[in-house]
Image (tube, rainbow, N blue to C red):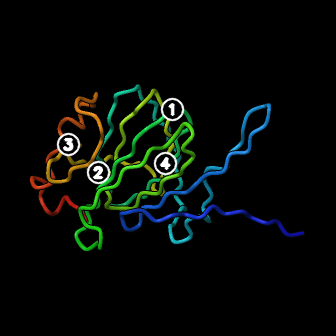
Amino acid sequence: MSTTVITPLALPTLIDGVYTVPIRAFADERGQFMETFRREWFPSINWDKLQTNRSDSKAGVLRGLHYHFYQVDYWFVTAGLIRAGMVDLRPNSPTFRQTYTVELGDSHHIGLLIPIGVAHGFVALTDCTLTYIVNNYYGDGSDERGVAWDDPDLKVPWGIEHPQLSQRDRQNRRWQDIPSDQLPK
């Protein structure tokens, strides 16, 4: 007996390697069901060290911009609404320094794949819950990198002027002030 797997089409974005995945919701009088992630949707990524995380944020919180050397992120908002913002920091990428924003959550049933070297963050437009899957276990924090959310050279269009930030994100430097050995290759 064979099983048919319905795979959503991962859609490319303005940044090379960033994909959105339209998620189908099946609803009835009891509620709804959504399949939000499968490894086989992204066969080129090694998911052997799969880790799932959850982030809860209040409206007006901005988390980011963060980037990694060893970790791919896959995001899905389970409650609320966010605006995800990204900028390509990979100097050899055809979309180097290109920005992209997308709203996730509420009626926007979208998964978001963020590759290594793409700085990413989000602003919570409402109180929200973001689940994210990464392909590498959290270690000692040495792969946690950041760049200023409001860097005027990167110009991510957040749509917010005075977000609530963590102490860590307040200390993120401008892109031009980060030593080259601390930027994606």
Q: Disc 4 or disc 2, which is closer to the eye?
A: 4
Identity, as a three-letter code, of the amino acid under mark 4:
Trp
User: Which mark is first along the chain, 2 or 4?
Assistant: 4
Mark 1 surroundings: few (<14), some (14-19) or many (≥20) residues within 10 A: many
Element type at marker 4? strand
Residue located beneath label 4 in the image: 75
How far separated are the C-alphas under marks 1 and 2? 30 Å
Residue located at (14% from left, 63% from top)? 180
User: How many numbered circles does the render carry?
Assistant: 4
Residue located at (50% from left, 67% from top)? 45
User: Which mark is first along the chain, 1 or 3?
Assistant: 1
How far separated are the C-alphas under marks 1 and 4? 13 Å
Say above or below: 184 vs 56.
below
Residue 123, x across and y down, in percent = 36, 37
Residue 21, x across and y down, in percent = 55, 57
Residue located beneath label 3 in the image: 150
How far separated are the C-alphas under marks 3 and 4? 22 Å
How far separated are the C-alphas under marks 2 and 3? 23 Å
User: Which mark is first along the chain, 4 or 1?
Assistant: 4
Identity, as a three-letter code, of the amino acid under mark 1:
Gly
